[in-house]
Amino acid sequence: MGCYSFDTIFRVMKLEAPAAVEAGSSELCPETFPKAAIMHFEFPARGDMPPVKITWYDGGLRPARPEAFEGNRKPAEEGLLFVGEKGAILCGFTGENPTLIPESKMKDTKRPPQTLPRSAGHDREWIEACKGGKQTPGANFEFESLVTETIQLGNVALRTGERLTWDRAAMKATNAPAAEKFIRPAYRGNWTL
């Protein structure tokens, strides 16, 4: 599910692979993801954008309640919370219905101009691509591979129990030899690629 949530974040913040990742979880099982996990991703500066930290909460774990949350207001079961120096924005799982926190700031705020292209829907984009359409679908491999790489690095950090520093060009955790078996696992039997 992280790939769906991070898609919006990657587009808006122009992210690529993280520079560092660390994670913790409930009991680990060799075959499955744990019941609950927290992953911390650190991304370097991009152009005129400063470094950014992103935390993923999973399995019912949640971030601390923002101080500016009004009284009994409760966040949705799932969604995105952007916390900055001047406040916070709470929105749905794919970035829909953004609300400033505190909500009272919404009445004094004008919507910013649209800067990201809008999708006709992933199903429509897929059909148009199959028909030879000229527009690249939003969920294309070139873009989504960056998102998947990031989420999988969180999984590797969970498995190793180490803070990983990531060299994207070399596809290597530079400080954690134990990560290599998860990044480039051995093939079973006579299988090769």
Image (cartoon, rainbow, N blue to C red):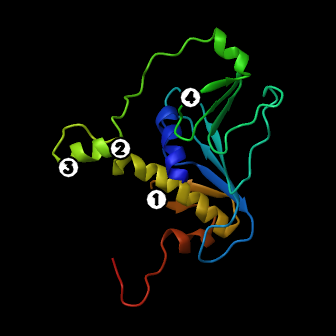
What residue is disc 2 on?
Answer: 122
Q: Which of marks 4 and 3 is in front?
A: 4
Q: Nearer the viewer, mark 1 or mark 4?
A: 4
Give percent across and percent down for residue 29: 66, 75
Amino acid under label 2?
A: His
Cα–Cα gap, marks 3 and 2: 12 Å
From the viewer's perspective, is residue 142 above or below residue 192? above
| Residue ID at (54%, 54%) | 1
Give percent across and percent down for residue 122: 35, 44
Instruction: State the SS at label 4.
Output: loop
Amino acid under label 3?
A: Cys
Q: Which of marks 1 and 3 is in front?
A: 3
Instruction: State the SS at label 3.
Output: helix
Q: Residue 130 carries which label?
A: 3
Cα–Cα gap, marks 1 and 4: 39 Å
Amino acid under label 1?
A: Ala
Cα–Cα gap, marks 2 and 1: 32 Å
Residue at far bottom of view = 189
Q: Which of 21 and 141 is in front in this view?
A: 141
CB atoms at circles 4 and 3 under 8 Å apart?
no
What residue is disc 4 on?
Answer: 97
Q: Which mark is residue 65?
A: none
